[in-house]
Image (tube, rainbow, N blue to C red):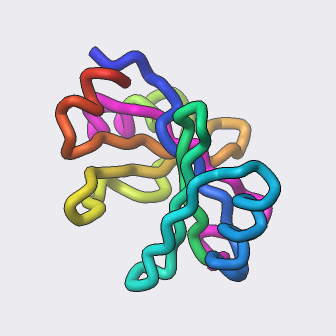
Amino acid sequence: MSKRNVVHVEIPASNVEGAGKFYQELFGWKIQPIPEMNYTTWESEGGSAGGFPEVSEENPAGQVIVYIHSDDIEADLKKVEKLGGKVLHQKAEIPQTGWFGVFRDPTGNVLALYTSMDEEFNKNN
């Protein structure tokens, strides 16, 4: 069973490369641009990580999304609905990386679930 750790944080940006440079200079984060996805990942020295998706209707500015590790995204999304939340994005694959699902809690906060293709990662989170 997962520890339900926060495993990824996304900060929408109008310029993903510029955001990477900003946070690299501000916090010293390791930055990795992924141009084919118009996405930039970040990793702190302490081990937390995330990315900068381009601002869009799905990722509006100001809506930082926290990803929580899940052993069973489908089951967790069903539980979200049972508890009064709303599923915004059913389980989907991130090629060669893992799977995610997005939901809104009863208060209106948007969060996401994540399962890695890396079994070692899953054991530790």
Q: So how many labels did they put on this image?
A: 0
Asked if 8 appears above or below 68 in the picture, the reply is below
Q: Position of residue 121 (x, y in %)?
A: 29, 32
Residue 110 is at least partly visible in this image: yes
Q: Position of residue 101 (x, y in %)?
A: 39, 50
Q: Kindly identify the residue that appears in the image at 47 percent across and 37 percent down.
A: 7
Q: Toward which corner of the image does residue 56 lie, by quadrant?
A: bottom right
Residue 56 colored in magenta in the image: yes
Q: Kindly identify the residue that appears in the image at 70 percent across and 59 percent down.
A: 24
Asked if 105 appears above or below 36 in the picture, the reply is above
Quarter containing the N terminus: top left
In the figure, is residue 73 to the left or right of 45? Answer: left
Q: Toward which corner of the image does residue 109 lie, by quadrant?
A: top right
Q: Position of residue 105 (x, y in %)?
A: 61, 38
Residue 111 is at least partly visible in this image: no
Quarter containing the C terminus: top left
Q: Kindly identify the residue that appears in the image at 36 percent across and 51 percent down.
A: 100
| Residue nearest the observer in this picture, 20 or 107 | 20
Residue 98 colored in magenta in the image: no
In the figure, is residue 47 to the left or right of 107? Answer: left
Asked if 66 appears above or below 52 in the picture, the reply is above
Asked if 115 appears above or below 18 in the picture, the reply is above
Per the rendered image, the range of residues in magenta is 55-78
Q: Kindly identify the residue that appears in the image at 49 percent across and 57 percent down.
A: 88
Q: Position of residue 84 (x, y in %)?
A: 55, 33
In the figure, is residue 99 to the left or right of 44? Answer: left
| Residue nearest the observer in this picture, 67 or 30 | 30
